[in-house]
Amino acid sequence: MTAPLSSAKTRDALRISARVSGELLLVLVMLAVSLWLLGRMWSVVWPLVVGLLLTTLTWPVARFLRRRGWPPALAASVVTVLFLLVAAGVVALIAVPVASQSGELTDGVVEGIQRLREWAAGPPLNIGDAQINKAFDSAVARAQQGVGSMVGTVVTGVSTVVGGVVTAVLALFLMFFFLKDGPKFLPWLSRQLPGRLADDVPIVFARGWATLGAFVRSQAAVGLLDAVLIGLGLWILGIPLVLPLAVLTFVSAFVPIIGALFAGFVAVLIALVSNGLTDALIVLAIIVVVQQLEGNVFQPMIQSRGLGLHAAVVLLAVTLGGSLAGIVGSLLAVPLAALIAVVWNYVREQLGEPPEEPDGTDEPDTAAPALP
């Protein structure tokens, strides 16, 4: 026979449930307000985030120079100039070979379009020139009807480019100041905070900084692996511009989803116009296989080891970030999840029970037994 419910225990359970629900609701409201404020300040927050990521990439060089007795300002200046030179070298490594073979590539594009038309004119499509011209005229008419939207799109694109340039310039200046004055930040922050926060917050910040460094290094490792595998496949097939395409693959690895799509599209296009449809399909298959290995094997494994996150957490974080904030969300999802894990682990350390000291009575008797 089932015992009747206790009214006192039931009221206590409901009271505790209501209190916990109210506290969770307050936490969610605070989180929503924080995200709203973050969105309002995004024009400042985004350059700050980019500057921090660039600083984690260049800090080892600056730290090496500072340990050799270089003044902080001089070390930061040299590292910033070296970073700009490397960035310019990467752009030149991609642009110069492409420009030198631009005529050949243009001829290949024209030839590829002609082959495509001939293929479309044959079976099973049997699309004649009249149908192609009609479709072209229809596309032109639609473009003329949508001139207003096209102008708006162009204006939006120009503003996006300008905003990207401004963000890059601000990020470079912030990187310089972080390299120059970064080690002074935690002592200054400790002096500004009261009580226990003066000890806890700098520790969390230091662990978060190490986590960001691990994220950048893991992303560079994934990009290098992609560049080597895809570049090797292009070299075996005899595709031109192998080195620029490999460098483009490595650089684009730092931009999730869109970067891989862009680098893959360029590689397939060059293979199509230079080696034909068969090699282009083989290049597409190589890129798809490598990208699947990266997204489902390499990246989760490398980042989970470097950031202390499970591979499934990395996959879920990238998926959630992309669905909530697009490309930027995909880029920031993994380091944000790692920073949340840093904070959570530190809170657990502080709230955990200290290990109990063993009593002397519980210690095993290690004395030698008496001889009979």
Image (spheres, rainbow, N blue to C red):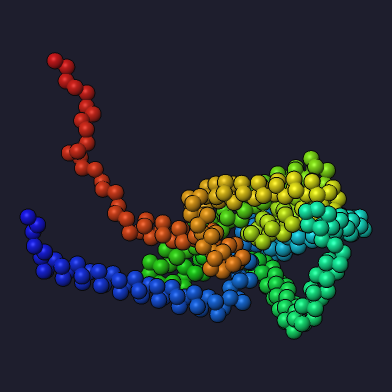
Front residue of 149 and 245 = 149
Number of numbered discs = 0
Q: Residue furthest top?
A: 372
Q: Is residue 76 left or right of residue 321?
A: right
Residue 125 location, quadrant: bottom right
Residue found 29% across the figure and 54% down from its top: 353
Residue found 83% across the figure and 66% down from its top: 132
Q: Is residue 26 left or right of residue 110?
A: left
The quadrant the N terminus occupies is bottom left
Residue 184 location, quadrant: bottom right
Query: Residue 101's x, y, as percent?
Result: 90, 55
The answer to whether residue 42 is above or below residue 359 is: below
Q: Is residue 343 visible?
A: yes
Front residue of 244 and 117 = 117
Query: Residue 287's x, y, as percent?
Result: 70, 49
Query: Residue 216's x, y, as percent?
Result: 61, 56
Query: Residue 242's x, y, as percent?
Result: 80, 48
Q: Residue furthest bottom?
A: 148
Residue found 86% across the figure and 67% down from its top: 130
Front residue of 78 and 68 = 78
Q: Is residue 63 left or right of residue 281?
A: left
The quadrant the C terminus occupies is top left
Q: Is residue 74 visible?
A: no
Residue found 49% across the figure and 74% down from its top: 35
